[in-house]
Image (cartoon, helix red, strand yellow):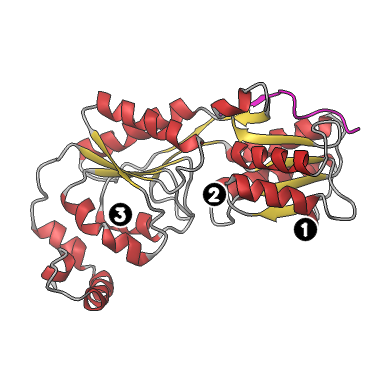
Amino acid sequence: MSRALTGSIAVAEDTRARIFEEAERLNYGASRRSKAVRPERKGLVGLVSAALHNSFFPYLIERIHDELDTLGYDLVLIIDDLSSAAASRKIQGLIETAIDGVIFTTSAVDSPAVELLVKRGIPTVLAIRSNKRGNVSVVESDNQMVGKEAMHHLAGLGHTRIGFLLGPKDTSTSLDRFAGAQEAAHALGLEITDELVQWGSFSHESGYSGLVHLMGIKNRPTAVFCGNDVVAIGAMDAASKIGIVVPRDLSIIGVDDIPMASWSMISLTTMRQSIAEIGTLAARRVAKQIEVGGNQQITHDILPTSLVRRATTDRPG
């Protein structure tokens, strides 16, 4: 079994997969760690991200890198969402022998990779997103407040029919932002019907196709809340393509306040979250866990957000 778990090329992949499954059932990895002394610290922190196409994440990764460097750690970038158990197993040996801790910037609420690391006692921090179990340290923005404040802004301008272009249903950012928007809509006496809600990805393409769909329904919205700025910019491109003038015909609001959002040709109204503060704090949290020898000190940091009003929202025409 040990040859399979340490990645020996003498073991076939299908055999290795079965052995990993059995090892998980028996908690074999944990017993190995308890019986052996873990190698000396390597000074390396793994950073898992599968969204480099989203310009938000390079800025976040840069901030994490800079803070880790200040703290005496190097960063190893793992470009994968590790969404399957098989993918998680691929890096298990790397994590257990070469990396002192892991920061996830993209993870689902039920990520098997996160659960594996928590079970192994490896210092782990989620930056931006959280999980279902609350068993791992998290640094995130107040995403429910993001949804609430965006709705109040649009409703305050006079919009009563508001559409949604959201990210994946399995991410806390999407779920929490929509939950906050629903709560605000209820308080404001607004109805959110199924036809007004489009789930997709945090991508330009998703924003583009989602906006085309919303503009094609019989009673289309006069404003759209987008899951992030990249989605919002995709929606703006679609609006321009199909002859809808923003904000005269349609108001659009995003989330993040990436640098591109402030460009004069875009001038996107958005909910700002602090990229620098999230990155800095995530790096400090994982470093602290490494120092104390595990992930037993669970913390949950929720950082405030703020509305940045620019040129893409206005009263309905």
The residues tagged by marks 3 and 2 sit, at their Cα atoms, a distance apart of 19 Å
Residue 268 drawn above or below residue 186: above
Dot 1 surroundings within 10 Å: few (below 14), some, or many (20 or more)? few
Q: Residue furthest top?
A: 264
Q: Say which amino acid is labelled 2.
A: Ser
Q: Is residue 55 visible?
A: yes
- Sequence order check, earlier mark of 1 and 3: 3
Quarter of the figure that contains the C terminus: top right
Judge from the rendering whether residue 231 lies leftward or rightward of residue 102; answer left or right.
Answer: right
* Mark 1, residue position: 194
* Mark 2, residue position: 172
- Sequence order check, earlier mark of 2 and 1: 2
Residue 314's x, y, as percent? 82, 28
Callout 3 secondary element: helix
* Mark 3, residue position: 117
- Per the rendered image, the range of residues in magenta is 304-317
Q: Say which amino acid is labelled 3.
A: Leu
Judge from the rendering whether residue 109 lies leftward or rightward of residue 249; answer left or right.
Answer: left
Judge from the rendering whether residue 59 lies leftward or rightward of residue 152; answer left or right.
Answer: left
Residue 66's x, y, as percent? 32, 26
Quarter of the figure that contains the N terminus: bottom left
Q: Say which amino acid is labelled 1.
A: Asp
Callout 2 secondary element: helix
Using the image as rendered, state which of residue 236 and residue 147 is in the foreground: 236
**Residue at point 62%, 41% (across, down):** 144
- Identify the image quadrant of residue 156: top right
The mark total stands at 3
Dot 3 surroundings within 10 Å: few (below 14), some, or many (20 or more)? many
Q: Is residue 11 magenta?
A: no
**Residue at point 44%, 26% (across, down):** 276
Residue 228's x, y, as percent? 61, 39
